[in-house]
Image (cartoon, helix red, strand yellow):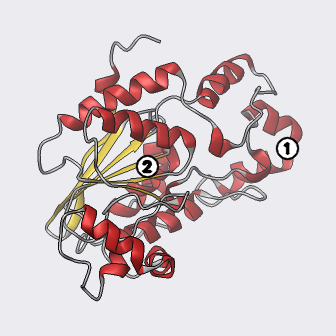
Amino acid sequence: MGGPPVRGAGLPPAIVAVRHGESTANALFAVAEAAGALEVPIDCRDADIPLTALGRRQADALGRRLAALPGALRPQAVWCSPYVRARQTAEHALAGFGAGLPVRYDERLRDRELGVLEMLTAAAIEVRHPEEAARRRRLGPLYYRPPGGESWADVALRVRSLLADLAGHDGPTGRADRADGADRADRADRADGADRAGRADGADRADHAGPDGAGTGDGRPGDGRPVLLVCHDNVVLMLRHVLEGLDEAALLAVHAAGPVGNASVSAWRREAGRMQPVCFNETGHLAGLPR
């Protein structure tokens, strides 16, 4: 898997991707992994895990970093994972950088699903699912899919789908928007201050509803504005895989260099018909934050 990078035609002039700030699960797993523990005291769904106090400070610092981006990179629309830790990161970051920016919550930006391995430490997987641990080592992370979960390649497929929508193609989200109705599309148009309510394609592109069904603003795909993606570590990694056309060996080398950090910034700019990398996994803005 790999192949040529995604063509930049139709994509936003810049894509900035950030991982959420430190979550309670991140903190608990760090302690458990260091101790070789089998149990992690988490009793909620992965989607409901919130930020820690440090994670909120990281998100505030992230907002300041985004505000300092040059104009060509500074996001003017936001697409966000619906998971609580990502939503909280977006809220904190936007308070210091882009209050009032349109936000669209999209399931394709959710964290990688781990199925039967969810909430298990590496030690616990070896003890409780030794056959899966062996299969993962044999197949490698790009192609290994835990029972009930996703491989990296599965995440890459939803990243490709999201990028198609960002390029203005008629993907699954566009169809859902139309099914939701033109009434909210017209409201989104009016809120944006543009006279698009009477256009034939207004319902196709203007409605961007959050999980609660309420319109979240005018984050239309393909409208020439830099976009911020608030997401998770594997999604950021798969964005690099897809946008830059990294093959398996190159992708694994990036992964081996270190994890995508909490509240890190990665960015790509459209140049000569391609999305060219600007930075990856940048965390300098987090230096000196108190724990």
Q: In the drawing, does residue 173 fall left or right of residue 125?
A: left
Q: How far apart, in angstroms, are the residues tagged by discs 2 and 1?
A: 29 Å
Residue plotted at (71% across, 57% down): 149
Whole-percent x and y of residue 143?
63, 61
Please name the residue that numbered disc 1 is placed on: 130
Front position in the image: 281 or 204? 204
Vertical relation: 8 (above or below) 81: below
Please name the residue that numbered disc 2 is placed on: 236
Vertical relation: 2 (above or below) 33: below
Neighbour tally class for label 1: few under 14, some 14-19, many 20 plus, Cα within 10 Å: few
Whole-percent x and y of residue 198?
25, 84
Whole-percent x and y of residue 159?
46, 63
Of circles 2 and 1, which is in front? 2
Front position in the image: 11 or 60? 60
Residue plotted at (33% across, 32% down): 62
Mark count: 2
Of the two numbered discs 2 and 1 on the same chain, state the one appearing first in sequence.
1
Q: In the drawing, does residue 265 fall left or right of residue 234?
A: left
Q: Quadrant of residue 70?
A: top left
Amino acid marked by disc 2 = Val
Q: Is residue 164 visible?
A: no
Q: Dots 2 and 1: beta carbons under 8 Å?
A: no
Q: Is residue 72 visible?
A: yes
Whole-percent x and y of residue 223?
22, 69
Residue plotted at (36% across, 73% down): 185
Q: In the drawing, does residue 42 fall left or right of residue 2?
A: right
Amino acid marked by disc 1 = Pro
Q: Quadrant of residue 264?
A: top left
Vertical relation: 42 (above or below) 159: above
Label 2 secondary element: helix
